[in-house]
Image: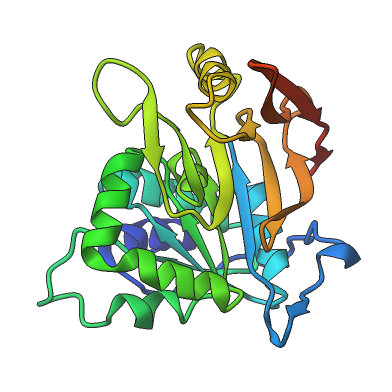
């Protein structure tokens, strides 16, 4: 079996099984992204994208771990462990010097022999999939995954993702997880404030987000176009990045009952 076929087959057939990846990737992190500590504990790190957490974002995430060959786990709860997303993740990891893993949430104790803490706390980074954020949050809380992710964050394991994988880390945000219309979802609250993904890709996102913030129905926060994202160190913006020239990041707040949108110009990564 050729190596590429092995990657795809293993992605479908194994949970938490590390796979070799190709060498040669150049990290995008700079000296300012070097590992740090806060009061003796590890620095907490989250890297998000509005949509499209592809190879450049995974490469950046890998560099943020400070490890030569980091263990990166894909957590596809929001997509109901959809196989196509897992295949895409392994393909995106293939050019990089990383060890990719996948941990499904729809499991049985007969085959899942490791606890959530044993899996996630053994990783250097965790990528959360897109999908239904509301269902993701409900499953995480029922399974206790939310508590393990909090511990992973506190330990300095780099967290991230796009869409539901970016929204989940904030206090709240806009979601299409319910019928009929965009609505508000409450999330983990690691990062204060709100978030809107797909800001340029889905027509309803921008006006709804601005309306909610202007009316005081949602906290101020950050909106990301597809292919644009933010690296948070602790809960502060450390770097704004994109993989596409037109992709932007915005901070949206309310002044005098009106939404004020401030552009945060990103740096290109590849």
Would you say residue 151 is visible in this rendering? Answer: yes
Side (left or right) of 72 relative to 132: right
Side (left or right) of 69 relative to 244: left
Q: How is the image coloured?
A: rainbow
Q: Residue furthest right?
A: 31
Above or below — where is 242 with respect to 180? below
Residue depicted at 53% across the width and 16% down the height: 211
In the image, residue 112 lies at what x, y percent?
A: 20, 75
Residue depicted at 50% across the width and 73% down the height: 152
Which quarter of the figure has residue 196?
top right
Side (left or right) of 211 relative to 244: left
Would you say residue 83 is visible in this rendering? Answer: no
Which quarter of the figure has residue 148?
bottom left
Asked whether 129 or 87 is in front, the reply is 129
In the image, residue 217 lies at what x, y percent?
A: 48, 27
Asked whether 72 or 255 is in front, the reply is 255
Q: Residue furthest bottom?
A: 40
In the image, residue 129 lies at what x, y percent?
A: 42, 48
Above or below — where is 259 with respect to 74? above
Residue depicted at 46% across the width and 69% down the height: 150
In the image, residue 157 lies at what x, y percent?
A: 57, 72
Q: Which quadrant of the rendered structure holds the N terminus?
A: bottom left
Side (left or right) of 263 relative to 126: right
Q: What is the number of callouts on the image?
A: 0
Q: Which quadrant of the rendered structure holds the C terminus?
A: top right
């Amino acid at each position: 079996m050729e190596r590429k076929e092995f990657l795809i087959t293993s992605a479908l057939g194994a949970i938490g099984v590390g796979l070799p990846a190709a060498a040669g990737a150049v990290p995008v992190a700079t000296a300012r992204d070097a590992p740090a500590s806060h009061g003796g504990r590890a620095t907490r790190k989250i890297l998000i994208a509005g949509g499209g957490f592809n190879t450049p974002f995974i490469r950046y995430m890998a560099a943020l771990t400070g490890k030569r060959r980091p263990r990166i786990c894909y957590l596809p709860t929001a997509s109901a462990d959809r196989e196509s997303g897992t295949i895409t993740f392994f393909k995106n990891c293939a050019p990089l010097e990383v060890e990719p893993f996948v941990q499904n949430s729809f499991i049985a104790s007969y085959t899942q022999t490791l606890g959530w803490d044993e899996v996630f706390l053994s990783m250097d980074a965790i990528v959360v999939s897109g999908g239904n954020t509301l269902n993701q949050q409900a499953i995480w809380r029922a399974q206790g995954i939310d508590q393990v992710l909090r511990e992973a964050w506190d330990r300095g394991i780099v967290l991230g993702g796009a869409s539901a994988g970016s929204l989940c880390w904030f206090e709240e945000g806009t979601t299409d997880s319910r019928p009929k219309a965009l609505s508000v979802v409450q999330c983990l609250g690691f990062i204060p404030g709100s978030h809107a993904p797909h800001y340029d890709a889905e027509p309803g996102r921008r006006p709804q987000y601005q309306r909610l913030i202007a009316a005081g129905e949602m906290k101020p926060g950050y909106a990301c176009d597809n292919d644009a994202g933010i690296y948070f160190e602790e809960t502060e913006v450390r770097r704004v990045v994109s993989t596409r020239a037109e992709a932007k990041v915005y901070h949206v707040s309310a002044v005098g009952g009106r939404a004020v949108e401030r552009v945060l110009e990103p740096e290109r990564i590849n």
